[in-house]
Image (cartoon, coloured by chain):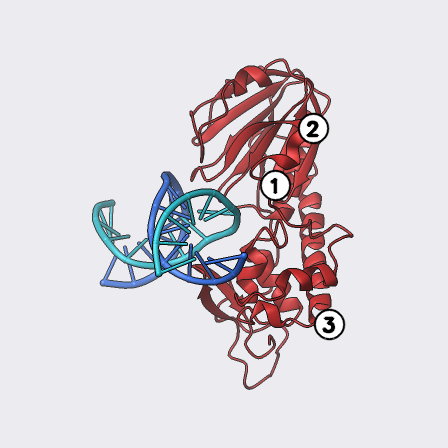
Chain colours: A red, B blue, C cyan
DNA sequence: ATGGAGACCTGGTGGC
DNA sequence: TGCCACCAGGTCTCCA
């Protein structure tokens, strides 16, 4: 479900309501998600104070006192349910709510993940980036260090389609299918372009488009965050106006009146749908 | 080393 | 209403 902006939004929501608080209850309703839950997870969480949060690519790191971090990935269908406990109401565990945490201040966190492609692990806070899931990740796209030069070097020599390359988390970390489609459209680059042929000028456009698309989506998620903590307040994908994603057959928004434009096309690359305008994107 | 296909899971949608 | 095929925001593992 979530790409970088959604994960950032979820992380901020968790930070706003869990940071500085002590976990008084922790329950696992399954022994595993994608992999088995780490041994002793519930016991480690119970009584722990939540010190801080961090996002790396699509991973959330919740730092606990005592030096451990809980690593969380939402997979394809992961959502977070943050609610305020009401003593007058019975607490029910939702379908697919695999992990539940409660704080001393009556905030209830539920991790919902029907497909269970998500993951949870424990890692020493001082060694977060050495975790096997984080160790190989490329640069953060919103980081100042992610420049056109960095991107072009990452793409250099790659014969794979540009779309596929941008989904490779080792080249740039956090992009998913939706925002890659959107960034390619904005930068007028074709998803079928051989990655290694991208010029410096094109890499510059692409970096700019990636940062813009992600920043706007985070801003939109941020605005949807206000007052989300209420019964059944779910954190996941927010409403967002995508220009090409999921719009096969619709008119290209930037080709009005162009006689050769047949609208947004959908193709499959590496098993994933790509949406683009063949007239505009080269 | 690189790139592609299959695998892991459940749920929603649309066609017949 | 029921059944079935197909689709979905990710990424790991295996194979050529």
Within 10 Å of disc 2 (Cα), the crowding (few <14, some 14-19, many 20+) is few
The foreground one among C11 and A6 is C11
For label 3, the SS is helix
Examine the image and state in which quarter residue A254 appears. bottom right
Q: Residue shown at 78%/52% (left/top)?
A: A144
* Residue at the far bottom in the pictured view: A259
Which of pointers 1 and 3 indicates the residue nearer the eye?
A: 1
Going from N to C along the chain, the mark reached first, 2 or 3, is: 2
Query: What is the number of callouts on the image?
Result: 3
Chain of the residue where label 1 is placed in the rendered structure: A
What is the number of the mark on residue A37? none
In the displayed structure, A173 sits above or below A257; it is: above
* Residue mark closest to the camera, 2 vs 3: 2
Whole-number angstrom distance, CA of label 2 to CA of label 3? 39 Å
What residue is pinned by disc 2?
A: A126
Which labelled disc corresponds to residue A201? 3
* Front residue of this view, candidates A265 and A251: A265
Percent x, y of residue A151: 68, 60
Badges 2 and 1, same chain: yes
Left or right: A222 with respect to A76? right
Q: CA distance from mark 1 to mark 3?
A: 30 Å
The chain containing the residue under callout 3 comes to: A
To which chain does the residue with label 2 belong?
A
């Amino acid at each position: 479900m979530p790409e970088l902006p959604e994960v950032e939004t979820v992380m901020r929501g968790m930070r706003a309501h869990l940071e500085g608080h002590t976990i008084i209850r922790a329950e696992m309703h399954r022994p595993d998600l994608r992999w088995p839950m780490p041994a002793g997870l519930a016991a480690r969480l119970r009584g722990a104070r939540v010190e801080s949060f961090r996002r790396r690519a699509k991973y959330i790191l919740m730092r606990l006192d005592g030096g451990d971090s809980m690593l969380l990935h939402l997979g394809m269908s992961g959502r977070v349910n943050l609610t305020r406990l009401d003593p007058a109401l019975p607490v029910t565990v939702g379908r697919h709510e695999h992990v539940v945490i409660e704080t001393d201040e009556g905030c209830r966190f539920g991790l919902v993940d029907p497909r269970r492609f998500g993951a949870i692990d424990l890692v020493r806070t001082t060694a977060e980036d050495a975790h096997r899931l984080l160790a190989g990740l490329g640069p953060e796209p919103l980081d100042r260090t992610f420049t056109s030069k960095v991107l072009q070097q990452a793409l250099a020599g790659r014969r794979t389609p540009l779309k596929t390359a941008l989904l490779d988390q080792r080249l740039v970390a956090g992009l998913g299918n939706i925002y890659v489609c959107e960034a390619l459209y904005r930068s007028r680059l074709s998803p079928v372009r051989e990655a290694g042929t991208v010029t410096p000028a094109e890499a510059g456009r692409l970096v700019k488009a990636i940062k813009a698309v992600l920043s706007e989506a985070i801003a939109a998620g941020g605005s949807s965050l206000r007052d989300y903590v209420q019964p059944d307040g779910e954190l996941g994908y927010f409403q967002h106006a995508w220009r090409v994603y999921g719009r096969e057959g619709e008119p290209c928004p930037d080709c009005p009146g162009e006689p050769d434009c047949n609208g947004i096309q959908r193709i499959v690359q590496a098993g994933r749908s790509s949406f683009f305008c063949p007239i505009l994107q080269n």
